[in-house]
Amino acid sequence: MLHTGILPHHTKWVKLFENLKYVVIDEVHHYRGVFGSHTANVIRRLKRICRFYGSEPRFICCSATIANPKELAESLTEEKMVLIDNNGAPSGKKHFIFYNPPVVNRQLGIRRSVILETKDLALEFLKKGIQTIVFGRSRLVVEIILSYLKEKLDNDIVPSNKIAGYRGGYLPKERRAIEKGLREGEILGVVSTNALELGIDIGKLDVCVMAGYPGSVSSTWQQAGRAGRRSGVSATLLVASSSPLDQYIINHPDYFFQQPPENGLINPDNLFILVNHIKCAAFELPFEAGETFGKENLSEILEFLEEERIIHHSGNKWYWMSEAFPAEEISLRSASSENFVIIDITNGSRVIGEVDRFSAPMLIHEKAIYIHGGNQYQIEKLDYEERKAYAREVKVNYYTDANLAVDIKVIDEFKGQRLKNIEKHHGEVNVTAMATMFKKIKFHTHENIGYGPIKLPAEEMHTSAYWINLTPEYTDLFNSNEIESGMLGICNVLTNAAPIFLMCDPQDIKGVFQVRSPFTKLPTIYIYESYPGGVGFSSKLFEIHDKLLTTAFEMIESCRCEQGCPSCVGPVNEVGSKAKEHALKILEGVLNGEEYKG
Amino acid sequence: MVRSIRDRLKSSGISNRVRNNSLKSFTPLEKIMDIEEVETPFGTHLLKKSRFPLSYRHGKFPLETVFELPQDTLVKVIKRENFDSFNIRDFVFLDTETTGLAGGAGTVAFLIGIGYFTDKEFVVNQFFMRDFHEEPSVLYMVKDLIDRYKGIVSFNGKVFDWPLLKDRFAMHRLTLKKESFDHFDLLFASRKLWKERLASCCLSSIEENILQVKRKDDIPGELIPSVYFDYVRGDQAAPIKKIFQHNLEDVLSLVTLTGCVGTVINNPLTHCYPEDIYCLGKLFKSTGDLDKSCECFLEAAKRAQNPVIKQKSLKELSFLLKQKGEYDRAVDIWRWMISRNTMKLFPYIEWAKHLEHREKNYTKAIKVVKRAIEIAHKRRRVFGNIKNNTKVLQELRHRLERLERKLARVREFGNNTG
């Protein structure tokens, strides 16, 4: 609204801007990462228009519990803030239950599926008519749990239409109906992604079941907050998956309850984001000589945009000079505004959902099973140019899961430091990701029952990364097998440990291991950001490098498996049977050993 | 190593252009055009003044046609606007050329053409900013001129040109003397008068088909922003001349189109296109001139070759006659249409209503309704299940049942008395 509606048409809101006294930003902790970085720039634009009309509004922000509410609000609004942090809201008694599914295969370290456990627990409540919300970590998980619940309840006392799914990709009308149903008690159970974590009014429910650790302490509190009325008892169940992060949390309840929650990080000066908003700002009001916008050199960016023939220097001002309407081309929530729509062609044709460009190769490649509202659709054709996927309703006993091949190249190193036996770096990289094949995975047993190729162009992205490599001298101490499986294991653990400190979604960062990186010529682990340009996660990782490696070491060491499992270094069939041992050996030398020099 | 912002932006994929350093080495517009530089408290800009005698012909009509229309005519076209003591000399004719169609604070009117009448001639002022910093100066003079008038004539200006100008005034803190202006938007009028005949009511279509204006070497509207951008960046000035010409012709067309609209409304039946006469019938109906409206529909029905227009005219005419209480004439139309085996349902339904409620001839009414049900089924077979069909059928069945009940009661009553 502010971004594409009010600010670009500010001349129609003169009265508002002349008299604007207060700006209130609710749920400010939500404005972090990419979204927060965009929002900070929208606020820069807002303040600029206010100055033009002679007002100087005061900012009031409300936040859930995070480690740095003051810092986040200050970097979001670029104003000095005063923190008020005593909470007087009444609340009823609340149980918080950590549930670790039983181990079914000790050797492989495999626990009973988080999805099946969640389904069983949720059923217990639903059958007794207790209003329950289930959170799943991905759209796929949400749809699978939803189909299981509907299947079970169909033959039971609760009609299956009292259970609904909720996630990004559902159309707005569908979502509003579900929210209303929850508030009014018409809907008994809802299975949701973090889309229902905050902001949306669905009233208070009785029970919250999380299928897997949501990825951050504050996210967990937010989701748990969906259960709990002012009076009466409520419960939250956290069901752990086999992932290392989940296992770490479930085995360290004290960490969860005592550790200060994560930091909300934003990077409003991410060049990609900043430049896009400078375009919007120039459209709204010409830039004057000496003006500033963000911390980068504005006149250099304006000169660049003039070369690009988007703005024009005349007198002592920079004017927007293009037929385009820049705000419409920028989506605040994701990297690209080019969404793919999914069209159901079973009967005629209707749009049933949408998927962003970067997820499309993984979710809606040809022959993929796309699940929506508990119904299965098979993608028959993906029109990549037109951004359309055509799907037909099917009934099959499997879902699909795609593999992604990733290649990474260093473009520029911003910072680098040699430590004991290891080097850490931070800089800019080029990532090429290509979906190569997909697996068909059977419902309930989750066994692999087939696969197929994916033929789609690679997606390329410039972003920020943090990477570490062993020193040449230290590398020489190990044979190639030890390096390969050990480092791969460390890479898996680091990727899972990093979100503990970053307050980001696990999907916001990704890890890649190269046995001999073309850049460092050494065994190297890269952790890169999923958003073009990055929003500051990687420079934070560079800072907390020591803490990160120590945590990774603890996670592997304290894991109760024998040879390595999905909860620490990764499944044996992917990383090898000695990965756990090798990873510990390598980390031990880095953390506690003596320094090897050539 | 710290890379420059430019390098970082290039590699992040934002850049998609080759660097283009055109130097400002061109002949200024003032040298190749008869145009003056004017000075205001806000700076300078260019102004081109063009004068035309009142008898000047732009296409089929001379400019002075505009004076022939009686005061109340235009008020009729835009029925909700109340122009008291309407005088075309109180209006300016406005058309702008802009840097795009997107709207919003970043869209600018770089050339503003304003025409007005003096005693002996029609004058067009074209205000032009050579670069963006000249906008305040242009707006200052535009405001000064508009403030002296009561109203605006435009083509689509209600939606586009005028709101955009108001935004520009707001941006530069210029306040017009009057809160609101009378606004005569010829796009709406044109749609009312010619939408049955013309596939498009855009200005070029109106010029070609109605005003008979033939433009020579006209610049297509969609090229105008980029031609202006190139000029501002230092390219040649010559193409700008074409934009001035384009804008001037637009303003002249506003004048003759206003005159033409008046002529058409004043002499509805002399028009040679039944489609237009039908539209005039609708116009008079909406302004409450029922007699004139009837005349138009009758004339259109008589002359129409196109069966669609003929049927639409007859329908409108029959309903107006019914409204005026001239039932016999209305019935004649319905019966005539039925005799021609029309596939339209309304003549059957209307005649059946008439038979039921006024003539109380239930037997005959039942026959007509049964016929209508047949037609409705046939329509479904031919056109598929179009909207309302089911509802109409349902209503017909209700009507049939009611008629049969009424008929039965009459018979019973008849038996008792007989």
Image (cartoon, coloured by chain):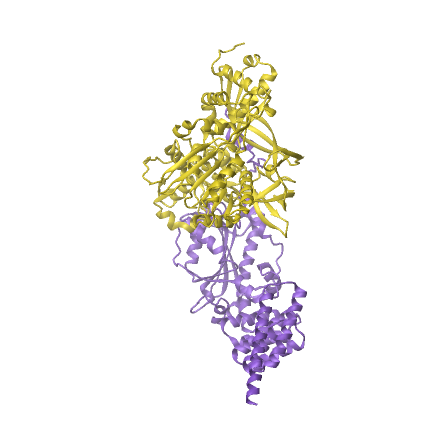
Q: Check the picture and name the quadrant holding the C terminus of chain B.
A: bottom right
Judging by colour alone, the chain drawn in purple in this rendered image is B
Q: Where is residue A320 in the image (x, y as percent from the top left)?
A: 49, 43
Residue A515 vs residue B118: left or right? right
- Of residues A296 and A369, which is closer to you in this image? A369
Q: Position of residue B291 (x, y in %)?
A: 53, 77
Residue found 40% across the figure and 38% down from its top: A28
Judging by colour alone, the chain drawn in yellow in this rendered image is A
Please determine whether, in this image, residue A213 is positioned above or below residue B321.
above
Please determine whether, in this image, residue B273 is positioned above or below residue A579.
below
Evaluate whether residue A265 shows in this view.
no
Evaluate whether residue A96 shows in this view.
yes
Q: Dividing the picture into quarters, in which one does residue B365 lie?
A: bottom right
- Of residues A399 and A475, which is closer to you in this image? A399
Q: Where is residue A106 in the image (x, y as percent from the top left)?
A: 55, 25
Total numbered circles: 0
